[in-house]
Amino acid sequence: MHKVFDKREVKSAIDRLAERVAGEFVPGRPLNVIGIRTRGETLAGRLAETLSSRGFDQIGRGVLDITLYRDDLSEIGPRPLVRPTQINLELDGRPMLLVDDVLFTGRSIRAALDALADFGRPSVIRLAVLVDRRGGRELPIQADFVGLELLDVQADQRVNVHLVENDGVDEVRVENSVASPTGTRNDPRAAQP
């Protein structure tokens, strides 16, 4: 299976996310929107902008790097790329929208929740993902808001999200995993927590 969702479909998925989020939270009240680096950060920015246009005028923005909280850190390599977490806002007692690009095993979200615990205690955390890749969950984690749900992705396939701010194009691609230089197939979970 090789499937591509183009920029129109990606925009529709993000619009669906924004509509669902707007229906859950109250305009005019504080809402923190935290994106998981890298594409979750980009999606969080887009969602915050859309919510602002819908009357949400007290949005706090933050960026979370979960690299050091991952349970597969030893498998990433000797020098994992760690970028700064930017959470310079009040978390305690305020609702939070946590944003990521793909939900697969649930391990990235677990790592994000662990990282967030170091910064404060929101009144509630809701999860928004652009793509929910079903069929590979390893932890009891589910998204509250989903833009695109993929039910038929095979174990040897990857879901790659590309966003114009990061990659020059808006698209979601379902592709076969590529063979590594040693000739073995990459574990599709390695880059899709």
Image (cartoon, helix red, strand yellow):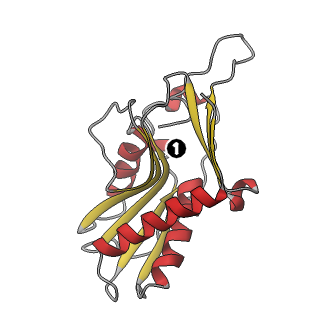
Q: Is residue 55 above or below residue 77?
A: below
Q: Residue furthest top?
A: 183
Q: Is residue 173 visible?
A: yes
Q: Amino acid at mark 1?
A: Thr
Q: Is residue 75 above or below residue 60?
A: above
Q: Residue at x 31, y 74 (%)?
A: 23
> Mark 1 sits on what residue?
67
In the rendered structure, the answer to whether residue 101 lies left or right of residue 123 reads right
Q: Residue at x 43, y 80 (%)?
A: 59
Q: Residue at x 63, y 25 (%)?
A: 177
- The x, y position of residue 144, in whole percent, is 31, 56
Task: Work out whether residue 7 or residue 92 is closer to the camera in this orientation and state it.
Answer: 7
Q: Quadrant of residue 92?
A: bottom left
- The x, y position of residue 99, in whole percent, is 45, 58
Q: Quadrant of residue 147?
A: bottom left
Q: Is residue 146 above or below residue 139?
A: below
Q: Is residue 85 visible?
A: no
- The x, y position of residue 22, in whole percent, is 36, 75
Q: Is residue 178 above or below residue 126?
A: above
- The x, y position of residue 48, in whole percent, is 49, 74
In the rendered structure, the answer to whether residue 129 lies left or right of residue 29 reads right
Secondary structure beneath label 1: helix
Number of residues whose C-alpha sits closer than 10 Å to that of mark 1, classed few (under 14), some (14–19) or many (20 or more): some
Quadrant for the N terminus, please.
Answer: top right
